[in-house]
Image: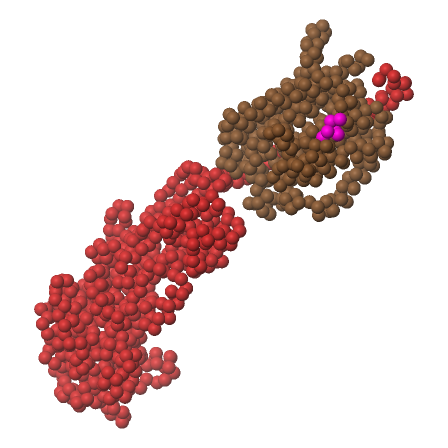
Chain colours: A red, B brown
Amino acid sequence: MKARRKPAAMANLRHSVLVVNRRALFAGAGMVLLILLLLLRLGYLQIIKADHYATLSQNNRLKVIAVAPPRGLIFSREGELLADNRPSFALVLDTGKVRPIDATVAELRELLQLRDEQLETFRGELRSRGRVNELTLISRLTERQVAVFSVNAHRFPGVRIDARLSRFYPDSRYWAHLIGYIGRISEQDLTEIDAANYRASTHIGKTGIERTYERILHGSVGYRQVEVNAQGRELRVLEETPPRPGHDIYLTVDASLQRLALDALGDRRGAIVALEPATGAVLALVSTPSYDTNPFVDGISSAAYAALRGAPDRPLYNRALQGLYPPGSTIKPVFALAGLDGGYRTPTTRTPCPGWYQLPDSSRIYHDWEHSGHGQVDLKRALAESCDVYFYALARDIGITRLVTFARQFGFGVPTGIDLPGESSGLFPSPEWKRKTHDQPWYPGDTLNVGIGQGYTLVTPLQLAFATAVLARRGHAITPHVAGQIEDPLVRVAVEPHFEDRLVVRLRAEEHWDEAIAGMEEVVHGTRGTARRTAADATYRYAGKSGTAQVFTLAQDLAQRTDKVAAQLQDHAWFIAFAPVQDPQIAVAVLVEHGGGGSSVAAPIVRRLLDHHLLGASAPPDAEAAPATLPEDADGGAMAE
Amino acid sequence: MAEQWRSRNLLDRMHIDAPLLVALLAVCLIGLVVLYSASNRSIDVVLRQAIHFGIGLGVMLTIAQISPERLMRWAPLVYAGGVALLIAVMLVGTGRGAHRWLELGGFRFQPSEIMKLAVPLLVASYLRDRSLPPTATEALLGALIIAVPALLIAEQPDLGTALLVASSGMFVLFLAGLPWRMIGAVLALGVAIAPIAWRFMHDYQKQRVITLLDPAADPLGTGYHTIQGMIAVGSGGLYGKGWLNGTQSHLEFLPERATDFIFAVYCEEFGFVGVVVLLSAYALVIIRCLRIAFVSQHVFGRLLAASLTLTFFVYVFVNMGMVSGQLPVVGVPLPLISYGGTAVVTLFAGFGMVMSIQTHRKFIANI
């Protein structure tokens, strides 16, 4: 073949070789250039940006997992568990890894047979906190759901089952208004908490003790550094800082008294607050109707929540702390003290009571609840029979300014400072207040109404219980509180929060206390006391005062015949008491909304509470056996105006 | 001189080019070492790849026995056979998404692999004793030889392989001295066709191009490969994390870590120093092949050896460029390092031709 080549072809060949050589050299140069380019790029990645990529690689490999601290438990005074942590399984979804989220959720809904309202909370959170990595889809999976998901887990990358502790309130109805509940952390909560400490937490105290003592109950977050593979599976733990569990709280509340109080109110609306005067400890605090707090923990469905909110008897409303009612005659012992201390009355000063009262330059008649009048009334009788005319005259003599100053000492118009959220400060009216809010002058008649606890004056059951405790301790007071001991579960050391014992009411003469308290004793033990029937067989001495808070101003004859007045228009029944008189162990205020007379409705409840606390659970419930209605005893929340 | 003659005689008799063989074995050895790590210490995978290498070496030595003259004569036959098989694939082929494989009696292979060699072989053979640079007609005919299989492969669809096959033939035309203006015209045509081609591209192909332009656009989707590859490469640093210590690969962040992305594993564990070592080994192969091309005394040998070298280089460059985030993820394995039998056998077959060109040199020159 080559042999046959002609010289011209040979020249051609030489030229061709030259062409190829040139191109091959060019290609070689190109390759060198490209290799240099490659080296430059790799050098850039591996030398200049090495640290950057090393960090990214570490971030890939290492995951710092925040570990939520177990929440502190809540116990009653005797150690009954009131707020527990129970193991549960939650389904969590990593919004960064699941794609598309909607389709995955739809699939899970089908697989686990979830109902739409179960996904409600998740959907809300997805909208507001979608950027957060992990969101809880379902808080408490059933065992069956756990099994079904586990089998299908491979189909759902980024979705996993998280074993956690869920709050559970055994017997929650008895404790709803006291302990409150925890709920999912909301956008609002996020602005108020230390986000780092809540990195692993899903819940936060929303109401009650759970809210007030959130910082103590929550504990501190822990961390675990783990190595993960690309699927996010944890391969090994590299480093661990265990969380510090929240502290346990032992309440001051006596569980049996609390139960008795709620049961005593039954299906009536009302509130009971019982305090230990010597310590300020809350022995019982109930508001009825109550409700089950457990559904709130994992997000109550909007339908159930609407039902609770819309219920006419407003179960969510904490009447003990927020309910505002005129104190009625229960405020009379305080004004009796004001009269004695200011020198306006002596214990024996008598006021004639014809059954009505009239201001000198006015034609207006102010009635006594007893139409026929009480006759000549001294202080003891005025309290025992709750004579309105005595206190009309007394209030007028003292004057509104001094009444305000004196009443404030007992805590009227100011919050007690209890360690529960949402407490109302109540209202004790003054001429300035009336001018400011109603743009009206203060009339002399207003003072008379204040004198018998009606009109503008508003108190909470807690305030009234507090004032009763102040009476019981003759001017001494300790801020009411629910938390007794706080215990670190790791070291089992309990600390008791300190509450200062302070003298809030200082009288010119100590005997004045005796006079007022004697009057209150007469209410229950006296022959003409408004509550004499409920105290008939008491083995201890106690002091009390009934009260009736007017709801509506009715024509007098109509108001007298309670049976004709619709339940909604009936007056609120009050009774306050402390016992025993010589060494007060308990001070209590009972309110029954629309209950009618304080002596007939509220006083028997007080008796049962006192019996229980002083005599023990074994005491026969005599008070209950007492006649339910004693119209003639019905105390005078008098018909002013 | 006499001693050299004797040794050459011995290797010549087996038609082996010792420097090329040594360089290739060096690369293969690196490949097996990385593969052990990339496969999570699977002796099984390493053994299978070693068997691939063995088969490849066998094929290389067999082809090296065939004289370049016979290769020229067989070129049209091989080419025609390859095209026939490509048509067969179109009709009865198998494969996920794209028809690439042909099953013959339980044996699966990709006919497109044959074309990686058949195309440059036929083009070089066609131009072997024409005066170079080629005329326009010759260039067009050469282009036709390239276009037929390239289009058939693109139709499968396997755009990456089609481009590689096309470029292997185009390298021959380039080396043959195709005038620059024609090259310019072809490139201009390519740019003009690109938007039209874009419309005919499959979504996943488009996605790859988009990903190259902005890998962070979809870090969990198609950008994932690129980002994780770059993290592996970069985190290796200067000296690497050490053999078997790459976290990106061993914790499964790297996709395709035994095949297309094995270079990322290598970079992570051996660092920039390792990269220089590997590139040096490749450079030895390339330099030796280019030298063979230069000393070849016939145009066919020069064209074929140089074009095969260029193709080999392109594989290396495209794969490394892809892993380091400079080129789109096109699915080109790293020659002799990535796990896989077909590619190894094809590569060794190519080197067999190069060795044939070298070891039959004296015989031809003597005529």
Query: Which quadrant: the N terminus of chain B?
Result: top right
Q: Is residue A93 left or right of residue B277?
A: left
Is residue A401 found left or right of A542 in the rendered image? right
Q: Position of residue A518 (x, y in %)?
A: 12, 75
A72, A161: nearer the viewer: A161
Whether B225 is drawn above or below B30: the answer is below
**Quadrant into which the C terminus of chain B falls:** top right
Which secondary structure is most common in the magenta stretch? Answer: helix
Does the rendering let one see residue A534?
yes
Q: Is residue A540 magenta?
A: no
For this rendering, which residue is in front, B233 or B71? B71
Q: Where B20 falls versus A313 (above or below)?
A: above
Q: Please say if B249 is above or below A170.
A: above
Q: x, y (%) of residue A379? A: 15, 81
Q: What residue lies at 48% left-to-right and 46% top-to-bottom?
A: A156
The quarter holding residue B260 reads top right
Write the start and end of the magenta stretch as one range: B77-82
Q: Residue furthest top?
A: B2
Tell me which corner region of the image, top left, top right, bottom left or bottom right, holds residue B303.
top right
Point 78% across, 22% down: residue: B73
Q: How many marks?
A: 0
Q: Residue at x 35, y 43 (%)?
A: A242
Picture residue at 30% right of the left edge, 82% below the top = A552
Residue B238 is situated, as x and y percent measured from the top left of the image, at 56, 31
Res A512 seen here: no
Using residue A119 as the reference point, say whether residue A348 is left or right of it: left
Q: Is residue B360 above or below residue B336?
A: above
Name the spot of residue A455 as percent of width and height, x first. Answer: 29, 81
Query: Along the horizontal axis of the image, is A282 left or right of A53?
Result: left
